[in-house]
Image: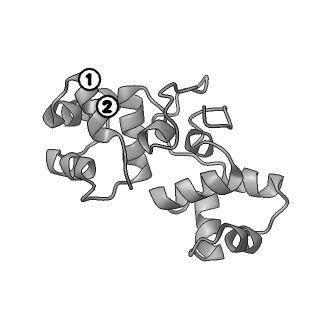
Amino acid sequence: METRFREIRIEHGWTIREVVERLENEVHYQSSIFHYSNVELGDSGFSVQFLIAVSYLFNVSTDYLLKLTDTKKRITKSEDTSKKVDNRFRELRIEKGLTMNEVLEQSHLTITASHLGAIERKETAMSVDVLIKFADFYDVSTDYILNLSDERNII
């Protein structure tokens, strides 16, 4: 998956060490130089929590970091959500009037209904790939699904 982690770091004129230090000091997220470097190179996966932390550090949307939009602007919520990862999977599913099995069938994801249920109940983490596929399926921004923004659409 192609991302903008390296591009935005260079744009800010920061070294990987500076990014990792800033993630820890400013966003309170622990990473390592090795991990961040591998993420930039595409040699390592990353968690949704990592994605959120980097979006906060650089003040850009998760959609921008994932190259789902070219607009950096992030429309934030009025409350601070940096300490939690919340999602709107259940809300979006119910809004469409679908069961978990129908969502999985229509979205062509290869996770089980019980896994989707655990994601909806916030009992398990989701992968970035699942996040992107559901954002596409529901036609909303990844920031919206993660409850980082009230803006539904990618700008």
For this orientation, the residue located farthest to the front is 70
Visible residue check, residue 121: no
- Left or right: 149, with 53 as reference point: right
Give the image location of residue 96, x and y in percent: 82, 56
Check if mark 2's residue and mark 1's residue have beta carbons within 8 Å: yes
Q: CA distance from mark 2 to mark 1?
A: 6 Å
> 70 or 43, which lies in front?
70
SS type, badge 2? helix
Q: Which mark is residue 12?
A: 1
Q: Which mark is residue 129?
A: none
Give the image location of residue 130, x and y in percent: 53, 61
Visible residue check, residue 48: yes
For this orientation, the residue located farthest to the right is 97
Amino acid bearing label 2: Ile
Q: Quadrant of residue 108?
A: bottom right
Residue 147 against residue 72 in the figure, above or below:
below
Amino acid bearing label 1: His
Screen quadrant of the C terminus: top right
Q: Residue at x 39, y 54 (%)?
A: 47
Residue 95 against residue 98 in the figure, above or below:
above
Residue 102 against residue 155 in the figure, above or below:
below
Give the image location of residue 24, x and y in percent: 25, 34
Q: Which mark is residue 8?
A: 2
Q: Residue at x 20, y 23 (%)?
A: 13
SS type, badge 1? helix
